[in-house]
Image (cartoon, rainbow, N blue to C red):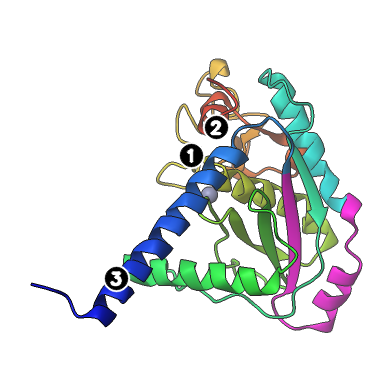
Amino acid sequence: MRLPRLKTVRVLTLLLVLCASAGVTAFQHHSSRSWTESLQVSIYPLNGDGSVKTAQYIDALDPEDFTLIDRWAAREAERHGLPLSAPVQVALGAPIDTLPPTLDENSSALQTLLWSLRFRWWAFRHTPDAHSLKRVRVFVVYQQGRPGEALAHSLGMAKGLMGLVNAFADDHQHEQNLIVIAHELLHTVGAEDKYNADGGPRWPEGYADPSLGQRRVQEDAEIMVGRRFGHQGLIMADSLQGVRLNEWTAREINWLD
Ligand SMILES: [Zn+2]
């Protein structure tokens, strides 16, 4: 049976959009993980609670504040023998005034898919300077937070090379914010979470150095967990200084054959 013309055009248009989107995703997947040149990462701050304090915090951010991520990635790449001395270059972009669409934690698969399309559209509209398809964009929503109340989850998506980080607008939290940014950034290039059911490190792939054995107390945390067992139980790493990228993660992001 012949399809009506309008319907044919619609189907063809949808197929074209899907093919183009799949093509862009395949290109990004390949280029972001080839490690022949530094992966460019732009950080865009947002004021998550609209407060003056958060606005002042964002105003005071300095590009230098984020170069610790570059140095940490360089240190870890060298440890894994990657022949690229600066695998990641982070730059601080201009603040964005409009908040991204929110995703409810109990969303269905379809709602999550629709949200991710809205998020990509929002990013396209608010970062018009992001011409390069090879650049990772991490949107950091800073907020004051309330005592005892956890921030919404952060996330990183390989599709579109985008991360969304919820962070405390507090100088004392800056180094831990960098851990979350590095974690979500690594999700965009293929790294997977390595938590166990309790949110601790899964044995052995969630451990910074499994060769030391499954001890309760460890010195370093693995980046795709961010936590380690200390003397008092599970604790978050203080800074990237105490975080490593282990062999499992190195393989996932194509640092190792
Ligand atoms: Zn994660």
Does the residue at mark 2 contact the one at mark 1 (Cβ under 8 Å)?
yes
For the record, the magenta segment spans 40-64
* Residue 189 quadrant: top right
Residue 254 lies, in percent from the top left, at 55, 29
> Residue beneath label 2, please?
249
Numbered circle sitting on residue 11: 3
Disc 3 versus disc 2: distance between alpha carbons? 40 Å
Quadrant position of the N terminus in the picture: bottom left
Precedes in sequence: disc 3 or disc 1: 3
Instruction: Indicate the secondary structure of the residue bearing disc 3.
Output: helix
Q: Secondary structure at mark 1?
A: loop
The residues tagged by marks 3 and 1 sit, at their Cα atoms, a distance apart of 41 Å
Mark 1 nearby-residue class (10 Å; few <14, some 14–19, many ≥20): many
Residue for point 77% across, 35% down: 72
Q: Callout 2, which amino acid? A: Thr
> Is residue 235 in the magenta section?
no
Residue 109 makes an appearance in the image: yes
| 165 sits left or right of 251 in the view | right
Q: Nearer the viewer, mark 3 or mark 1?
A: 3
The answer to whether residue 146 is visible is no
